[in-house]
Amino acid sequence: MIVLETSNLTKKFGGLTAVNDVSMTLNQGDVMGLIGPNGAGKTTFINAISGLNPPTSGSVKMFGDDTTRLTPEKMCRLGLSRTFQIPSPFPKMTAIETVMTATIFGNESGKVKDPVDHSREMLDFVEFPMAETVVAEQLNTVQLKRLDLARALASNPRLLFMDELASGLSEGELNDIMRIINKISKKGISILMIEHIMQLIMAVCNRLLCIQFGTKIAEGLTQEVANDPKVTKAYLG
Amino acid sequence: MDNTITSQQMNPFDKLLDKLCLTPVGLLGLVLLFALPYIPPFNQEYMLRWLIYCGFIAAMSVGFDLTAGYISIVNFGYAAVSGFGGYTSALLVINMGLSPWLAMAAGGITAGFMGLIIGMISLRLRGIFAACLSWFFGLAIMGLATKMVWLTRGPLGLRTPRLFETDSNAPFYFLMVILLFLIYLACKLIVRSKMGLAFQAIGQNMDAARASGINPVYYRVFNFTVSCAIAGILGGFYAHFYGILTPDVMHTSKTVEVLAVAYIGGRGSLWGGAVIAFPFIFIMEIVRSTLSNLPGLNLVIYSLVLILVMIYYPGGFSYFYDTHIRKPKNKVLRYFLNGRK
């Protein structure tokens, strides 16, 4: 089953074309890596899909329905969640409140019986290392990323975008995040992740999409794309 | 949200306090406010007038804080919206013969409508831009009130009937304290519901809030509407207490007065501004009356205190209270300051 399909998605900022004519498909159960050099338009691409920065042209189909230009909150209700490249929490809220926000507003009302319990489960699921009463502004980047992930999962998504979840992690933390990503995937959530760390990509992704200067240069199975001369050239110059 | 004791285990008194969003110390403060007119030197009429003004600013700062402290948009037109409610109320009484009480409510509704408009047109704007827009909106309303002389008598001032047909200020004072408490309660109940969570999320991080499924349009407009409706009701009170209404009540400096109190009291606490207003505005009134040869000195002091608070204690009084006073070792004192929670 096709979870996400974009056709000729284009995003222009004035005269600058950040995403140019990108078509891709994501199947149920995929863990797709979105790779490309810095400034390639990866984040813009997922912003265009998730509605934060609506596309200039082209269309997005999610779970078979046309979702082009829907607002982020609508996309969230439809089952799309995302984390942010720069973890952007609610600075004055505690961890549990942060997750509860998505639990309460991200789900159809009445679907989650006990929001507090559900939120605790999410924090446990991402192995959040701190107490649930800790205030977000006191957390470091690694902890914030975990919190952001818990928030994203709290709305019970069927499709999850992760924007550089693993950047800046140590070797041990990398293994932890690998395990968590596998856990998420096992829950039946399809994943599209922007990532630079090839070690992680090779370990968890079954398919890759490579973008350079806003244009798709490769899409396919992980090994094939990783060995594609165009992709190597984009990365190594 | 972090209730460790469920409501079934609380005794009726604590339950009631919790329903009223008060702590024992808060209740004591409220009782003190009611007793104040009987305690010398506050039992003099001119002091009572100052206290009413304190209560007015306190209540305004609670309503102001609902927007500034929760969705992080400073409504610089707040006094103007309040004055708009006041004028509506006064004109309804004068021209239509409506009872001042009903007119006050009508002032609240029209001001709420005004808030709805400000909320709608400032939707796409964030932070300082939304603040500017609300400011210009306020200036426009004030300009109208000044220029529409045929209706408002402009700077000459509109004479308005008072709420109580008495020379005593005491009934006005009690009404003000009740209004203050009701406004606090309304805001606190809103903030305690899941709506409060949405307000905070929108105020602290719009993108993350939207990605979490919160529709910012609905919550922002709702917030503005409630906050402005409160201002309108208070404007009506102001009009029917002082008995005269000039466009001056809509001036930005009035907003700044409210803003200073709300910020010194602590943003996002609701009670901070209400508590600080009484001593602070009272002292300001003393300064103003004793140093009447130096007009505007109180405004200089406002800005000075505000600058000092912003630099050295941006959390304001409520933050200071929460971090240094709220959690004493003594159990009785702890209960006194926090209630059974």
Image (tube, grey):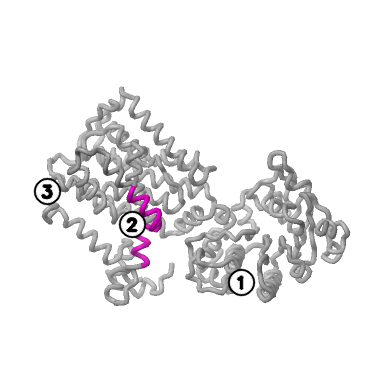
Q: Name the element at disc 1.
A: loop
Given the current orientation, which residue lies at the most extreme right position?
A: A229
Q: Chain of mark 2?
A: B
Q: Is residue B319 magenta?
A: yes
**Residue designated by label 2:** B272
Against B36, is B80 above or below?
above
Answer whether labels 2 and 1 touch (C-beta < 8 Å): no
Q: CA distance from mark 2 to mark 1?
A: 37 Å
Against B109, is B327 above or below?
below
Image location of residue A7, percent across then percent down:
78, 48
| Label 2 environment density (alpha carbons within 10 Å; few <14, some 14–19, many ≥20) | many
Q: Nearer the viewer, mark 1 or mark 3?
A: 3
> The C terminus of chain B is located in which quarter?
bottom left
Image location of residue B268, percent across then percent down:
40, 56
Residue A187 visible in the picture = no
Residue B2 relative to residue B253: left or right: right
First in sequence, mark 2 or 3: give its number. Answer: 3
Span colored in magenta: B304-323
Q: Which numbered marker is on residue A126?
A: 1
Q: Nearer the viewer, mark 2 or mark 1?
A: 2
Residue B159 sits in quarter: top left
Residue B324 relative to residue B134: left or right: left
Q: Is residue A26 magenta?
A: no
Q: Name the element at disc 2.
A: helix
